[in-house]
Amino acid sequence: MRTNEHGQPIGRPVDWSPREPVRPVTLAGRWCRIEPVADQHLPELYDAVVLGSPPSTWTYLAAGPFDEPAGLDAWLRELDEDPGSLPHVICTPEGRAVGIASYLRLDHRNGSVEVGGIAYAAELQRTTAATEAMYLMMRHVFDDLGYRRYEWKCDSLNEPSRRAAARLGFTYEGTFRNALVYKDRNRDTAWFSITDDEWPRVRSALESFLQPGNFDGAGRQRTALRI
């Protein structure tokens, strides 16, 4: 245990200086492409994430479901205009928008950022592209920007999100009770994170899983992701 001159326990030393802020970015993978949200994405997002997906897609999000494109447009604009949010669109390799994910809680001084506001179209859910999208976003934060912490938060009752966090290598840190009120109900928020010292192990597992040789001719995985 490290102590100071008063005999009090203190944290390990860190050679650190503030990093560059997270900014809108385009990230290209094999199975998907990440792009900053733009007006051109709205028609495809509405078709895929609203019309082409069950209303339950929006149960644990603060917005939606939407009856018309204007509602989705207003939500995306609100995210885009929030200085603490950077919404991005998940596209197929051909460029069709099929999902949304945002960088949140931007803290370049301490090297921490959250991924959230995730809305996947039904066709994107539980696919290799969905896994790769999360890999691309976290790789950018750790490898390109040199951050120390990557967060994931969800309603504690959102079991699919909790499973996804664990599968992607996030560590559960605890639950903040009565954290939010949304859609006229309480939200206890479950917190998860990956730290920079955990990232090499997580990255290795994700990159091994995403290798082309891990999939057969029909796109089925040969070895499941295990972190």
Image (spheres, rainbow, N blue to C red):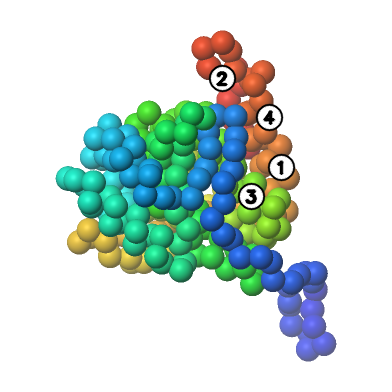
Marks 3 and 4, the one that precedes in the sequence: 3
Q: Which mark is residue 208?
A: 4
Horizontal arrangement in the rendering, residue 128 relative to residue 149 (left or right):
left
The mark nearer the N terminus, 3 or 1, is: 3
Which one is closest to the eye, mark 3 or mark 2?
3
Residue 60 horizontal/vertical position (percent): 31, 50
Question: What residue is shown at x 57% (from left), y 51% (from top)?
Answer: 25
Q: Which residue is mark 2?
A: 221
Question: Looking at the image, do the residues carrying marks 2 and 4 touch, with CB atoms under 8 Å apart?
Answer: no
Q: Residue furthest right?
A: 5
Which structural element holds mark 3?
Answer: helix
Residue located 53% across and 17% down the image = 219
Near-viewer residue (159 or 147)? 147
Q: Amino acid at mark 2?
A: Gln
Find the distance from the CA under tag 3 to the CA under tag 2. 25 Å
Marks 3 and 4, Cα distance to the nearest angstrom?
A: 18 Å
Question: Residue beneath label 3, please?
Answer: 140
Q: Which type of secondary structure does the marked residue at label 1 adopt?
A: helix
Q: CA distance from mark 3 to mark 1?
A: 16 Å
Q: Give the Cα distance between marks 2 and 4.
A: 11 Å
Q: Reading the chain from its start, which is encountered first: label 2 or label 4?
A: 4
Up-down relation of residue 41 to residue 185 (above or below) = above
Q: Give the structural element (helix, strand or loop) at label 2.
A: loop
In this rendering, position of residue 67 left or right of residue 175 = left
Are there few (<14), some (14-19), or many (20+) residues within 10 Å of tag 1? few
At a point 71% along the width and 37% down the height, the residue shown is 204
Expressed as whole percent of the image width and height from the top left, the position of residue 185 reads 23, 60
What amino acid type is highlighted by mark number 1?
A: Arg
Indicate the amino acid at tag 3: His
Q: Along the line of sight, which residue is nearer the eye, 29 or 44?
A: 44
Residue 201 - label: 1
